[in-house]
Amino acid sequence: MIRVTVSYPPHEGYSFDHAYYQNTHAQLIRDRLAERGLLKLEIDQALADPSGKLAASVAAAHMFFSDVDSFKAAMGAEGKVLGADRTNYTDIIPVVVISQVIQ
């Protein structure tokens, strides 16, 4: 199994609509990718550290697929729609990390 993490590192003056991301965009991911191999979706909202310093990421989506090929096929079919929705909730360019799930 793989986990695809799409995180949003903050920049000065960034904007991020957590309500839209957690509700509307997350549902769009589920609707578009559930039948294309998405096994599980987790959405995070990062918290500041105890000193009040910004977290390294504002938010993240963790998408689980059986393998990289399944993910590539899903994004090949739906990636443009999902990417186009980003302007509805943030001006941050996301960072994508693909990991092999060990445990």
Image (cartoon, rainbow, N blue to C red):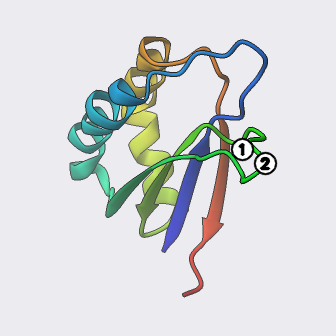
Q: In front: mark 1 or mark 2?
A: 2
The residue lying at 67 percent from left, 52 percent from top is 97
Relative depth, front residue between 14 and 84:
14
Evaluate if marks 1 and 2 touch, with contact meaning CB atoms under 8 Å apart.
no
Numbered disc 1: secondary structure: loop
State left or right for residue 21 relative to residue 31.
right
> For the point 42% across and 13% down, which residue is it?
88
Give the quarter of the image for residue 15.
top right
Classify mark 1: residues with Cα within 10 Å, few (<14), some (14-19) or many (20+).
some
**Horizontal relation, residue 13 to residue 65: left or right:** right
Dot 2: what SS? loop
Residue 101, position as x, y percentages in the image: 56, 77
Residue 9: x and y, percent?
71, 34
The furthest residue to the bottom: 103
Quadrant containing the C terminus is bottom right
Picture mark count: 2
Give percent across and percent down for residue 43.
42, 49
Disc on res. 51: 2
Where is 40 relative to 51, above or below? below
**Residue 24, quarter of picture:** top left
* Depth check, front residue: 100 or 13: 13
- Give the residue at mark 1: 55
Q: CA distance from mark 1 to mark 2?
A: 11 Å
In this view, 91 is above or below 50: above
Q: Amino acid at mark 2?
A: Ser
